Each structure stands twice: as structure tokens, then as C-alpha cells.
Image (spheres, rainbow, N blue to C red):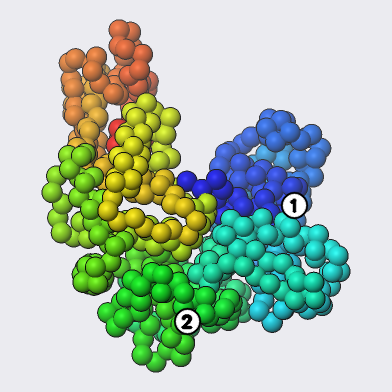
């Protein structure tokens, strides 16, 4: 996994320390209820006076946003949030976006990456920042750029110079902009002003039909970035990338390109977007599109394809994974292949989201041992593979091991939780409880009515003193099952199922 995620990087390098803390305080409050002012102050190493000032400033910041419906109240030392939409966390995205677009470093970031601002003087003219101040802040901005393997500096003659490939630059812009505008791009004040919908002018209808709303917005953003900024680097360097990795051209053939015939994007613009879009946007590939691409890769004897095909075959043999359906094998081959593309176009420390299986239960002995086994397998496979691939700097094996772990978990037998039900007051209540649980968790439950010692959870209306301490107990204390009882039952069962599956 990358050492830092995109949102954390943006906070660290584009926002002030105070703003970072205000966001952290708000996120904490949005996930909790009815907290003490003093306890929150201690958690964030603030005095109650300064915390109160922060909360007042956050309320004032939110008040400037037309979508805001949230009010922060402090009453008798208790902090509470109130909103008509009953959605506290959506205000976090609004607040994050607001702080980013008004931060000095983001304003400078935007001015620097504009193609027409090709000198420090033009950046200074647009931002009203002095040249000396721009040079001072540039170091911070380059720390953000550095995560993507690119950098910006000004030559002795004050001309702007950017290092990095076209793929790295456009992907960095997409990743940073999407993270900042995530969940706010749907707001009319953004789409109408900055991100006019140009999808139907350029993209095939069958591609658009596959994508959900957020993916459409992200693709639209990518088109705007490519249209406005391409080429950001030297086109000769771009051609060298295609020569180094010939398979990249397959993404722009008639079966794979996402562009419709009437698009006025140049051939090279289309090529770059055709490659970035499928590795940056979800649900791009239909079963047919995936099958066609894999067949084309096989036809041109693509080493990267042969590498992942051999990897998947060996992995299934070593870890005793049953024969896959053709659809599943194509799916896993495609994501493994895209991972190779990612490693070949971008540096190994590129910000990247970890797969769920690497995050949950990451401290369990079983999880650690399994990850070590998979990592050792992959290290051995890559060292002895007849296909020695070239990467941007070096391979990040964790990315591939994450995917292999996901494949292993996908084919592992599903474990069922064992629930004991002991209800003594009425004869039919236990049966009713089991029936309701089966409706919600039909395939994941084994019920036990007599021997509770091997259960994961026991639901009972009387004390059970002789059970092992690791067994979770749900006591029904009242004469009737309340909504709160059902919420507790369903919540604990869900957590138990989640823990067993991951």
C-alpha cells in the first residue's frame, strides 16, 4: 500500500495545520453523538475555549455554502449536530471542498498547472503572489506532485518546467481534482460553471450506459482535463511510452476505444484517455470488452498478458483454488493486467486505495500468516518467471498481493456463524427469533438450541454463567422484543459474519 492516500496528501500539503484539525474535529463529531466538549478538546489536544472557537468557525464556514443544512450546538457542555437532511457526513465533503478551494496552496497549485501560465511571472500575475512567495510555497506543492513521480520548477529564465510523463501528469490532475470535488461535482453550481457535460459529444453510448453517476462525472472530468491540458509534456516522450509498451495501442482499436466517431479529440488525446479511463474509473469493462481485450493481448503475444495468465494459473494450483468459470477468470486476469499497467505507467509509491481484505482483520494471526504466504508465493513466482517485465521505477508487489488475497478469499468456503437461542418465557418466541434471523441471513447461520458452548452468539432471556468468555451474549431483558433489541441482534450478527468472512 502507498504510504499516504490522496485525501491525506491534499490535507498535508495544501491545507494549513489549523484547517486540518478543524476537519478532523468535524469528522469525529459527525460520526458520534452527544459528546462532551471537554472530552473532545482532550482528544484533539485543544483547550475547551479553542475548541469552541473552532466549532464557531466551522459553523460560519458551513453557513457560506448554499447546500448547508447543519447546525452545531453546545448546550451544558454537550456538543450536538442537527441537520434537516439527517446526513452529517455529506457536510464533511462540502467542508473539505470549501477549505481546499480557498486554501492559498490550492490557488497556487491551480495557477501553476495552467498550461498558459508558462512562467513564474504569469503565475504571479494570476494569483497576486510575489515571485519569492511562489518559490517558497513551490516546495510544498512539489511534495504533493512527488507522490505521482512528477515535479514543477522554474528555470533560471523563470520559465515553467515540468518533469514526468503525460500519463503521470494527467492522472495526478484527475486524482487530486476528483478527491477535492468528490460528491460535490453533482452540484449545479459546479457542473454548470466548470464541468459542462461533454460526454455524449465524445464517448460511445454503450460505455455511458454502463457507468453509474459518479463514474460519469469522473469520466467527464477526465475529458475536460485532457481537452484543456493535452499535451502537457513532449509528444515525442509520449510516443516513446507507446513504443516501450506496444500493448497500449490495443486500447485505442475499434473494439476497445471509448470514443465515438464524432469526437474531435486528437488521436493522441484519445489514446491517453483510452488508457487512463479504465484504470481510474469503476465498471468500465463489459464481459465482451474484457474477453476481446484479453484475446487481442494473446494474439500479439503480449508478455504482460502471459505473465498474469501464468500467475493466475500458478496461484490457483498452489492455493488449491477450484477451476474458475470463464467469466470469473477473465475478470481476475483483467484486474491483474490493469495492475501491471498501473505499475508500468506510474511510480511504486503512487497513491492507491487498499483492497478491503488488506484493511479488515489486518492484525489477526490468520490474516498475517495468509498475507505472508501469498507474498512469499509472489516473490518466488516473479523471480522465476520467464517474463521479466519493466516498471516505471520498481514494482510494488503489495498491489498484486492485495488482488491475489481477494481471489483467495473469493473462493474460500464460506464460514457459517453458530447462534444459540434460549428463550424461556414463551414457547414460540425462540422459533420466531430464528425465523426473523433466517429471513435476513439465510445462508450464513447455524442455529443451536441445546449445547451453546460452541456458539459464536447466544440470544437468551436468562443468565448463562458457564459459557466461554469469547461467546457474545445478547440478553433480552424486557418482556417483549423491542426495536432496540432487534437492532442489537442484527448488528452483532452482521459483525460476526463480517469477521468470519474476512
Disc number for residue 269: 2
Residue 84 lies, with reference to residue 486, above or below; the image says below
Mark 2 or mark 1: name the one nearer the start of the chain. Answer: 1
| Front disc: 2 or 1 | 2
Compared across the picture, whether 123 is left or right of 394 comes to right
Which quarter of the picture shows residue 94?
bottom right
Residue 164, which numbered label? none
Residue where numbered disc 1 is placed = 16
- Figure check: 296 above or below 86: below
Q: Nearer the viewer, residue 146 or 388?
A: 388
The residue under the point 75% across, 52% down is: 16
> Of helix, strand and loop, which one carries label 1?
loop
Q: Is residue 394 visible?
A: yes
Residue drawn at (41%, 45%) of the image: 398
Q: How many marks?
A: 2
Mark 1: few/some/many CA within 10 Å (<14, 14-19, 20+): some
**Residue 167 percent across, percent down from the top left:** 50, 69
SS under mark 2: helix
Q: Position of residue 238 (x, y in %)?
A: 49, 76
- In percent of the image, x 72 and y 78: which residue is there? 118
Question: Is residue 486 something one can see in this rendering?
Answer: no
Amino acid at each position: 500500500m502507498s504510504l499516504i492516500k490522496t485525501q491525506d496528501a491534499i490535507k498535508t500539503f495544501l491545507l494549513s495545520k489549523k484547517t486540518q484539525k478543524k476537519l478532523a474535529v468535524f469528522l469525529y463529531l459527525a460520526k458520534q453523538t452527544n459528546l462532551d466538549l471537554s472530552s473532545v478538546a482532550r482528544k484533539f489536544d485543544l483547550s475547551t475555549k479553542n475548541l469552541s472557537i473552532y466549532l464557531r468557525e466551522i459553523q460560519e464556514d458551513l453557513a457560506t455554502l448554499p447546500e448547508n443544512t447543519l447546525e452545531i450546538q453546545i448546550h451544558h457542555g454537550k456538543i450536538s449536530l442537527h441537520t434537516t437532511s439527517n446526513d452529517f457526513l455529506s457536510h464533511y465533503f462540502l467542508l473539505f471542498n470549501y477549505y481546499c478551494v480557498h486554501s492559498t496552496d490550492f490557488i497556487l497549485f491551480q495557477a501553476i498547472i495552467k498550461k498558459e501560465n508558462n512562467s513564474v511571472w504569469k503565475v504571479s500575475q494570476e494569483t497576486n503572489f510575489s515571485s519569492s512567495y511562489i518559490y517558497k510555497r513551490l516546495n510544498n506543492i512539489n511534495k504533493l506532485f512527488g507522490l505521482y513521480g512528477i515535479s514543477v520548477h522554474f528555470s533560471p529564465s523563470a520559465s515553467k518546467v515540468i518533469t514526468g510523463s503525460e500519463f503521470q501528469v494527467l492522472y495526478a490532475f484527475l486524482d487530486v481534482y476528483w478527491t477535492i470535488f468528490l460528491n460535490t461535482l453533482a452540484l449545479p453550481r459546479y457542473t454548470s460553471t466548470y464541468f459542462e457535460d461533454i460526454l455524449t459529444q465524445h464517448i460511445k453510448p454503450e460505455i455511458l450506459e454502463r457507468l453509474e453517476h459518479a463514474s460519469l462525472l469522473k469520466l467527464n472530468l477526465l475529458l475536460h482535463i485532457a481537452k484543456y491540458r493535452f499535451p502537457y509534456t513532449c509528444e515525442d516522450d509520449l510516443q516513446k511510452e507507446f513504443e516501450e509498451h506496444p500493448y497500449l495501442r490495443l486500447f485505442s482499436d475499434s473494439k476497445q476505444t471509448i470514443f465515438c466517431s464524432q469526437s474531435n479529440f486528437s488521436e493522441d488525446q484519445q489514446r491517453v484517455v483510452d488508457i487512463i479511463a479504465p484504470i481510474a474509473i469503476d465498471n468500465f469493462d463489459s464481459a465482451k470488452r474484457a474477453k476481446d481485450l484479453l484475446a487481442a493481448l494473446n494474439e500479439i503475444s503480449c508478455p504482460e498478458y502471459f505473465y498474469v495468465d501464468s500467475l493466475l494459473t500458478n496461484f490457483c494450483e498452489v492455493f488449491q483454488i477450484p477451476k474458475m468459470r470463464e467469466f470469473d477468470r477473465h475478470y481476475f486476469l483483467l484486474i491483474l493486467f490493469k495492475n501491471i499497467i498501473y505499475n508500468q505507467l506510474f511510480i511504486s509509491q503512487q497513491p492507491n486505495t487498499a483492497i478491503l481484505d488488506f484493511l479488515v482483520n489486518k492484525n489477526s494471526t490468520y490474516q498475517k500468516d495468509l498475507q505472508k504466504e501469498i507474498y512469499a508465493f509472489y516473490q518466488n513466482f516473479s523471480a522465476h518467471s520467464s517474463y521479466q517485465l519493466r516498471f516505471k521505477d520498481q514494482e510494488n508487489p503489495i498491489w498484486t498481493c492485495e488482488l491475489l488475497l481477494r481471489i483467495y478469499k473469493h473462493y474460500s468456503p464460506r464460514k457459517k456463524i453458530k447462534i444459540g437461542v434460549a428463550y424461556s418465557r414463551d414457547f414460540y418466541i425462540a422459533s420466531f427469533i430464528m425465523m426473523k434471523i433466517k429471513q435476513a441471513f439465510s445462508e450464513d447461520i447455524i442455529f443451536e438450541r441445546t449445547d451453546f458452548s460452541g456458539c459464536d452468539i447466544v440470544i437468551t432471556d436468562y443468565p448463562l454463567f458457564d459459557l466461554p468468555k469469547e461467546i457474545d451474549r445478547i440478553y433480552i431483558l424486557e418482556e417483549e422484543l423491542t426495536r432496540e433489541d432487534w437492532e442489537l441482534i442484527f448488528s452483532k450478527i452482521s459483525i460476526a459474519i463480517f469477521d468470519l468472512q474476512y
